[in-house]
Amino acid sequence: MSKLNIVILAAGIGKRMQSSLPKVLHCLAGKPLLVHVLSTARKLSPDKICIVYGYNGEDVQKAITDHDIIWVKQSEQLGTGHALMQALPFLDDDASTLVLFGDVPLVKIETLRNLLIVSSNNLCALLTANMDNPYGYGRIIRSQEASKVIAIVEEKDASQAQKKVCEINTGVMLLPNKYLQDWLPKLENNNQQHEYYLTDLISFAVENKVSIATERPINTWEILGVNSKVQLAKLERIYQNNYAEKLLEQGVGLADPERIDIRGNLLCGQDVMIDVGCIFEGKVILGDHVIVKANCILKDMTVGSGTTIAPFSLLEDSEVGENCRIGPYARIRPGTKLASKVHVGNFVELKNSSVAFGSKANHLSYIGDSIIGKNVNIGAGTITCNYDGVNKHQTIIEDNVFIGSDTQLVAPVKVTAGTTIGAGSTITRNTPPGQLSLSRSKQVSIAGWMRPTKNKV
Ligand code: UD1
Ligand code: CA
């Protein structure tokens, strides 16, 4: 294969988004549109990737952390042809350039590979698609005899007859750089929008008898662009439906494929069941037989086989072992590591803590910066007081400890193996092993005490 350069056009303001954020930074499935295009581009292993940026360009550059991008500034947005023109000095003489749009995020690598196949080094190639409603797109005009592409006409410049053409320009095209060098400087802006149209390059190709190959996308939705929030929402649904379908094909059980959102990667073992309303962000790995019930959010999580996560639980950046029971209404914050058979019940919050085999915190607790041993029972309402207003401190609870309800453990503190703590205690010092420790005043009863009565007005 000859040398490949890729130019991603991303300088447009995106007026119809009605937002101060550059269009290409709006998110689809949790990632900026431009990031989707860029990661597809990378899969082709091009020799160079240029991004043409303009409106709020610094924000765009900040959002992309890849170091090998050639950033090309287009100070004034004078059209797609003008945008590519800015990249011209950075392109290799002996390469071909694939043009991608930063606002067309769903285009698949297989489709791009097909486009590369139909073009050879001295051929131009266009990705075109047939649309039931071609409104807004550039129309592909073909010669009547040979059905060869002879022009692309933009909606605003099209005649009534041309508007009826359903074959449209997706914007994805591949051209040898030697032609770009020759033709781009010759573009003019005498059209309805007074823009330098990339699409006018086709007329130069026709003039110079350079043949133009065309290829179709594998799926029509791949070429849909984002110009408004309405379109962004539609593309999000397409993306999510595709992901859900892929999961179903892999054997993952989904209560309703239309009510799951994946904003990253979800990797599932066998016989995983996911109920409605769940959101998966970042990288989430679910082991065999994991059940995620309704309305849970999991972000950057690993969950071991056989674990059930009950409704309305929020888990982030942590590891949950095998056969655990989490939730309902559990909150697992970053840095938590649960071994197997751990139970975390309703309104229990864990942060930066490890919990060993078989331990349970079933109701209303906060466990932060703690190390918890095996078979520990943490009573309802137990709180680790990990923060003194300035610094965080650690709580250690060793194996087989029983902590009575409504206990405060004032860190740094260690509850040694086998300790029992009486309910309602405030523990400020390390406990001796195997004993009952408690701190509470004795219960008193006052005979003859009267309840207050309501004041008369
Ligand atoms: C463009 C095509 C049209 C095609 C459609 C497909 C042209 C003239 N028209 O129209 O044939 O059917 O895409 O979606 O090419 N951009 C810049 N600098 C500019 C202008 C645009 O970088 O000066 C970038 C935008 O950020 C965007 C892309 O180019 O990523 C497309 O621009 P847009 O204005 O959306 O073009 P369309 O009118 O949709
Ligand atoms: Ca567009």
Image (cartoon, rainbow, N blue to C red):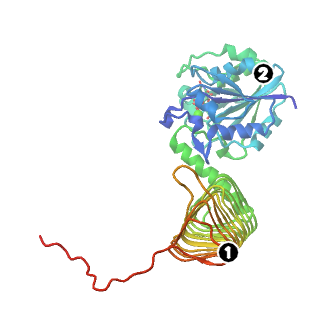
Q: Which residue is drawn at 53% across and 32% down?
A: 14
Q: Residue at x 43, y 80 (%)?
A: 443
Q: Which of 318 and 441 is in front in this view?
A: 441
Regarding residue 142, the answer to whether it shows in the image is yes
Q: Mark 1 points at which residue?
A: 433
Q: Distance between the residues labelled 2 and 1?
A: 78 Å
Image quadrant in which you'd find residue 154: top right
Quadrant of the picture in which ligand 1 is shown: top right
Image quadrant in which you'd find residue 315: bottom right
Q: In which quarter of the image is the N terminus?
A: top right
Q: Mark 2 points at which residue?
A: 177
Looking at the rendered structure, the secondary structure element under dot 1 is loop
Q: Residue 242: percent from the left, percent from the top?
A: 67, 54
Precedes in sequence: disc 2 or disc 1: 2
Q: In this view, does 364 lie to the left or right of 97?
A: left
Crowding at dot 2, Cα within 10 Å, few <14 / some 14-19 / many 20+, comes out as: many
Looking at the rendered structure, the secondary structure element under dot 2 is helix
* Position of 205 relative to 166 (above/below): above
On whether ligand 1 comes within 8 Å of the CB at mark 2, the answer is: no
Q: Nearer the viewer, residue 146 or 293?
A: 293
Instruction: Give amino acid for label 2.
Output: Asn
Q: Residue 171: percent from the left, percent from the top?
A: 66, 32
Q: Residue 451: percent from the left, percent from the top?
A: 26, 79
